[in-house]
Image (cartoon, rainbow, N blue to C red):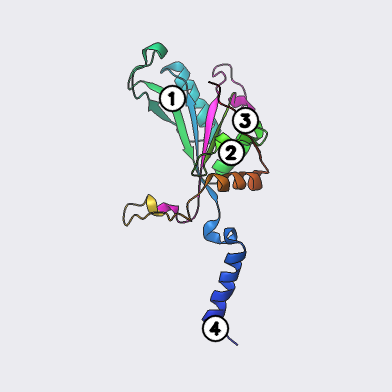
Amino acid sequence: MMATKENKDAKVDETQKTDPDKHPMRQLRITKLCLNICVGESGDRLTRASKVLEQLTGQTPVFSKARFTVRSFGIRRNEKIAVHVTVRGPKAEEILEKGLKVKEFELRENCFSENGSFGFGIAEHIDLGIKYDPGIGIYGMDFYVVLGRPGFDVVHRRRKTGKIGRHHRLTKKEGMKWFQQKYEGIILPAKAVQK
């Protein structure tokens, strides 16, 4: 006996109604991981920082330029002051795991943005398991994780771009829930802002 089309639709609808997050199109995943080291000056220190990122990711990092001159910091417009790299796929998950281990899988509530992505910083890159090199020194770095769902690429493609519907977009709560489930992470309350 063949199941009718109506029966199949009814079964699919029942599972989606009980738990819509189990639908394969609703699964969250890491779109990309951005690593950034801002040195604040060009020259030798910036070159050494790029070596740190290259050691960690195995990719060639990109230099970022200052957008405007800040005299008090000694920064000139268009001067290279930072270095960053974008990692995707399994390598991104592996590096993120190392970074979260340094933070002991604890993040503050204000680390999460309204679109579900999150970021944090570490003080010393040697905590990630990279051997200390006196020629390079110690650098801190910023991690930023962009989360997404299947179907998010319609916004970025060249032809026939579309919009992501309100119900398919990510929220801060969903990003926090994903972090707690995937990494058994702890979310601490946001720090009070001092005036």
Check disc 4: other Cα within 10 Å, few if <14, some if 14-19, many if 20+.
few
Q: CA distance from mark 4 to mark 2?
A: 46 Å
Residue 4's disc is: 4
**Circle 3 or circle 1, nearest the eye:** 1
Secondary structure under tag 3 reads: helix
From the viewer's perspective, tell me whether residue 190 is left or right of residue 41: right
Q: CA distance from mark 4 to mark 1?
A: 60 Å
Quick one: label 4 or label 1, which is nearer the N terminus?
Answer: 4
Q: Mark 1 — residue?
A: 82
**Which badge, 3 or 4, is on the more N-terminal residue?**
4
Position of residue 26 relative to residue 90, above or below, is below
Q: Earlier in the sequence, mark 2 or mark 3?
A: 2
Is 150 a magenta residue? yes
Q: CA distance from mark 2 to mark 3?
A: 10 Å
Q: Earlier in the sequence, mark 3 or mark 1?
A: 1
The amino acid type, in three-letter code, at marker 1 is Ala
Q: Nearer the viewer, residue 173 or 125?
A: 173
Quarter of the figure with residue 46: top left
Q: Is residue 95 above or below residue 169?
A: above
Find the residue positioned furthest to the bottom.
1
Crowd tier of the residue under label 2, counting other residues whose Cα lies within 10 Å: few below 14, some 14–19, many 20 or above: many
Q: Which residue is mark 2?
A: 96
Residue shown at 60%/41% (left/top)?
94
Q: Is residue 72 magenta?
A: no
Helix, strand or loop at label 1? It is strand
Mark 4 is on which residue type?
Thr
> Residue type at mark 3?
Leu
| Residue 12, percent from left and from top | 57, 71
The answer to whether the residues at label 2 and label 3 have Cβ atoms under 8 Å apart is no
Residue annotated with mark 3: 128
